[in-house]
């Protein structure tokens, strides 16, 4: 049965002076990947992301996930990503991160207001793993796999302990409208559906704090469990309403 893994992505609070992902008055948003200290191989920052950088060159980033190709890679030796070793075909990666309110189309439009949002979902169709070459990816997925930053950085060979997840295009999407987790509201979405590692619902102002509990990638819902499934459905209904995408379709 399908499990849902929560994955934090994008420029974070520690990058706020150099890179921010904006959200606009109409609810649309731009994904800005985190900046790096040295230039990286392609893909680089998109033209949409460039206005929301300050003192960061276009190649100074690890641009992942690739929303156009619906792929995501990670180094599973990193403790933050270790849980992704457990992902199997059919599982779902649910992406979330930080967005900053913006009233224009560049850095000067940031108001200082920020929040945490759901960005998109990727239902895993295929997994590239264990020093696999791009030629070993199934033919119909090979081209998009080869464009993922992890394959590019390895010169077509996936670095050891790295995995690249290829989403099923029928059931994967970047959300057109980001979904607010409502972390500052006691009845917010995050407190109605998301749990700590022991399975208890998170509670505003009480330990474990949501920020520490969700920092690392982990399995958040096992859809075979009725209670977990009901929580996933709470989130799914909000995503459908705001972004017209059902990440639980046909499950």
Image: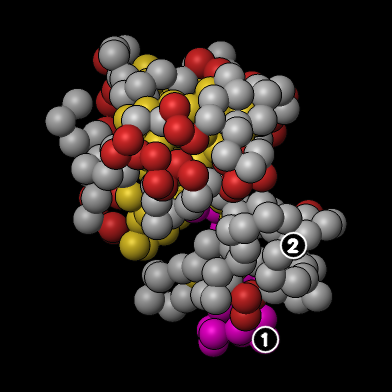
Region of the chain picked out in magenta, as a range: 101-117
Q: Residues within 10 Å of mark 1 (few under 14, many from 20)?
A: few
Element class at badge 2: loop
Quadrant of residue 19 in the image?
A: bottom right
Residue positioned 54% across, 87% down in the render: 104
| Residue 6 placement, left or right of 53 | left
| 75 up-or-down from 44: above or below | above
Picture quarter with the N terminus = top left
Label 1's element? helix
**Could you say where residue 96 lies in the image, as x and y percent from the top left?**
51, 46
Q: Who is closer to the viewer here, 144 or 179? A: 144
Q: Can residue 209 be seen in this view?
A: no
Q: Residue at x 33, y 50 (%)?
A: 173
In the image, residue 96 sits, relative to residue 200, either above or below, namely below
Q: Which residue is more in the foreground, 30 or 46?
A: 46
Q: Which residue is drawn at 80% across and 75% down?
A: 55
Question: Based on the displayed image, in which of its 4 quarters is residue 168 positioned?
Answer: top left
Q: Is residue 104 magenta?
A: yes
Is residue 228 shown above or below 145?
above
Relative vertical location of residue 245 with respect to residue 154 in this rendering, above or below: below
Question: Which one is closest to the eye, mark 1 or mark 2?
Answer: 2
Residue 99 in picture, x, y percent from top left? 57, 62
Give the residue number, with chain letter if any, for mark 1: 108
Q: Name the residue under label 2.
A: 60
């Amino acid at each position: 049965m399908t499990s849902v893994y929560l994955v934090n992505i994008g420029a974070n609070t520690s990058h706020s002076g150099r890179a921010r992902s904006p959200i606009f008055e109409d609810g649309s948003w731009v994904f800005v990947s985190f900046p790096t200290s040295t230039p990286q191989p392609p893909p680089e920052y998109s033209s949409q992301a460039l206005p929301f950088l300050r003192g960061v060159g276009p190649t100074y980033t690890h641009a992942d996930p690739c929303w156009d190709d619906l792929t995501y890679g990670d180094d599973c030796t990193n403790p933050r990503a270790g849980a992704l070793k457990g992902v199997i075909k059919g599982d779902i990666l649910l992406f979330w991160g930080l967005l900053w309110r913006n009233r224009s189309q560049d850095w000067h439009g940031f108001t200082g207001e920020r929040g945490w949002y759901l960005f998109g979902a990727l239902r895993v169709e295929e997994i590239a793993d264990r020093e696999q070459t791009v030629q070993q990816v199934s033919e119909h997925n090979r081209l998009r796999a080869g464009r993922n930053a992890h394959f590019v950085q390895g010169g077509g060979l996936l670095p050891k302990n790295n995995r690249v997840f290829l989403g099923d295009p029928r059931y994967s999407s970047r959300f057109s409208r980001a979904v607010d987790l409502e972390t500052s509201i006691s009845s917010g979405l995050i407190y109605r559906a998301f749990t700590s590692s022991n399975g208890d619902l998170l509670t505003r102002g009480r330990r474990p704090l949501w920020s520490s509990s969700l920092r690392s990638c982990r399995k958040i819902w096992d859809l075979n469990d009725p209670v977990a499934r009901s929580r996933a459905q709470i989130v799914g209904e909000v995503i459908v309403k705001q972004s017209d995408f059902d990440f639980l379709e046909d499950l």
